[in-house]
Amino acid sequence: MAFYSEYPEYVTVAEKRQKALKSIEKLKKKNPDISPVIIEGTKITKTWWGKSWTDNLESYSDYANRIGRGRSYVRHGAVLDLKITQGKISALVQGSASKPYQVTISIQALSKAIWQVITKNCAGKIDSLQELLEGKFPKKLAEVFTAKGEGLFPATKEIRLECSCPDGARMCKHVAAVLYGVGARLDNDPTLFFVLRNVVVDELITKAISQKTETLLEKSKARSRRIIEDPDISDIFGIEMETEVKKKKNS
């Protein structure tokens, strides 16, 4: 009489990583352009953009209890390929089956109305694209970016999840792994976030710098108007300026 365990066979993290590496090598032979997510160190995300992406997802009750299922998957290299394009995330994730699962995540473009409000709020508060990408901006601006329903980051209603695995859950562990993988990818290239949300980051920078330049010019003009001309100084203090003394000597 055969006995079957109700629990799946335990697989160590090292074995999972080895399996993922073999899958990556196999995929590279067919498609050299694959872009696996490699996590180095204990933290999945390290930069402001990567952390804010995962923090946003974890802040929604729809995702909070499910997204954690993907942490171990992305850590041991199960996300074999991840690509970000306008409004779409495409990925291959190694699961228990020999063939990787296909994951597609669609994200609605940021509305023009919200984008206009954000660019307006950024006016004069960002000095350069590099500063923006490094997350070096005022705290109030960070709050604008991360505001639920009114910021740059998508709400759950703007996200559609698909996976080829047999799991019937809206967010399976493969999808969750990809969502964490996106955060790690944004660490390396934050500009992909703007591509995903289908907005032009240059518009944000141009508006911010233009407004800052105008403000500086206005301040400069105001200072110029406050400068007292030499004749006025001589009248006020009853002294002869150097130029006036020279004129008298030459006359």
Image (spheres, rainbow, N blue to C red):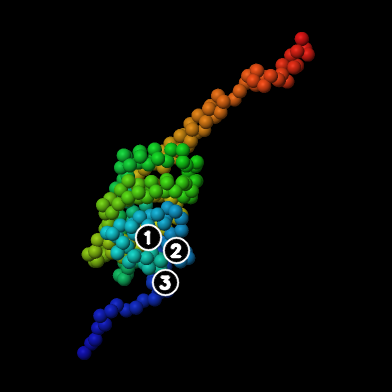
Pointer 1 residue: 180
Q: Position of residue 91 (x, y in %)?
A: 34, 58
Say whether residue 207 is visible.
yes
Q: Residue at x 23, y 87 (%)?
A: 2
Pointer 2 residue: 43
Q: Earlier in the sequence, mark 2 or mark 3?
A: 3
Badges 1 and 3: C-beta atoms under 8 Å apart? no
Secondary element under disc 1, as helix, strand or loop, is helix
Q: CA distance from mark 2 to mark 3?
A: 20 Å
Q: Earlier in the sequence, mark 2 or mark 1?
A: 2
Of badges 2 and 3, nearer the viewer stands 2
Say whether residue 182 is visible.
no
Quarter of the image for the C terminus: give it. top right
Q: Mark 3 is on which residue type?
A: Gln
Can you tell which mark lies on residue 18?
3
Q: Mark 1 is on which residue type?
A: Tyr
Secondary element under disc 3, as helix, strand or loop, is helix
Q: CA distance from mark 2 to mark 1?
A: 11 Å
Name the image quarter holding residue 179. bottom left
Q: Is residue 159 left or right of residue 71?
A: left
Q: Is residue 211 left or right of residue 198?
A: right
Tell me if mark 2 has few (under 14), some (14-19) or many (20+) residues whose alpha carbon lies within 10 angstroms of its own: few
Q: CA distance from mark 1 to mark 3?
A: 20 Å
Q: Residue at x 53, y 27 (%)?
A: 222
Q: Mark 2 is on which residue type?
A: Lys
Secondary element under disc 2, as helix, strand or loop, is loop
Badges 2 and 3: C-beta atoms under 8 Å apart? no
